[in-house]
Image (cartoon, rainbow, N blue to C red):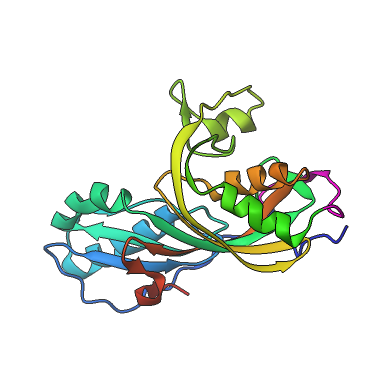
Amino acid sequence: MREPNRIENRNIHATTLILPELDFNPEGEILLFDKPYRCTSFDVVAKVKSAIRKKFNKKIKVGHAGTLDPLATGLVILCTGKMTKQINMLMDLEKEYTGTFFLGATTSSFDMEKEVNATFPTEHITEQQIYAIADSFLGESDQVPPIYSAVRIDGKRAYDMARSGQEAKIQPRKIQIDRFEITRIALPEVDFRIVCSKGTYIRSIARDFGERLDSGAHLTALRRTAIGNYRVENAHSLS
């Protein structure tokens, strides 16, 4: 089995964010940013907070409308000042993602954060099966989030429990997938485009995708391209 072009993620430091020159509105605004690989949504918030404080010499509230995993890139929406009241509305909007599944191998985090923990055959998988499995995800379903996630279990974060070796049972959640397009098949890699509801974990889709193919899979690339009508093409670069 060919190994993915994986990176030793644990040895990579967070990307240094370079904030463009922006004419911040002290009253508040909605800002779009293209988050680079290996930095967090909170890193983006901190960078903008610092720039606003420096420009106006005062603190202005800044919040994000939905996190994006450190290993993912793409659209992060920030709200400042009075526009932070719009955060809940923005978080409810559907999301669009593109990315890559690697078939025939799994990890405990369902992405490249952790090492491969099991391998599976892929010789039986056909292109027709891949398209059919993608279609099977359409509509409403129950999804179990990854154990390495910020989901709370009895007041504790699931990822904290996982890292400390505690057993954690995560309850499934209702999600909606409106589009699931397969854009490239070059086994063991499969590229996709997904439009889904808030709270959907693409890493969990990778896990379930592999299982439905009687194999295994994990996520090796993920990019958020849209939140509602807000698109990453219109976002400020941070690198």
Q: Position of residue 168 (x, y in %)?
A: 59, 24
In the image: residue 149, left or right of residue 79 = right
Q: Position of residue 221 (x, y in %)?
A: 62, 61
Q: Quadrant of residue 147?
A: top right
In the rendered view, tell whether residue 201 sits above or below residue 190.
above
Which quarter shows the N terminus? bottom right
Looking at the image, which residue is at 44% across and 60% down?
96
Which one is in front, 67 or 178? 178
Q: Which residues are magenta?
A: 113-124
In the image: residue 81, left or right of residue 209 = left
- Res. 8 visible in picture: no
Q: Position of residue 182 (x, y in %)?
A: 61, 64
Which one is in front, 154 or 189? 189
Which one is in front, 57 or 152? 152
Majority secondary structure of the magenta segment? loop
Q: Position of residue 32 (x, y in %)?
A: 33, 67
- Res. 225 visible in picture: yes
In the rendered view, tell whether residue 137 sits above or below residue 146.
below
In the image: residue 47, left or right of residue 80 = right
In the rendered view, tell whether residue 42 sits above or below residue 233.
above
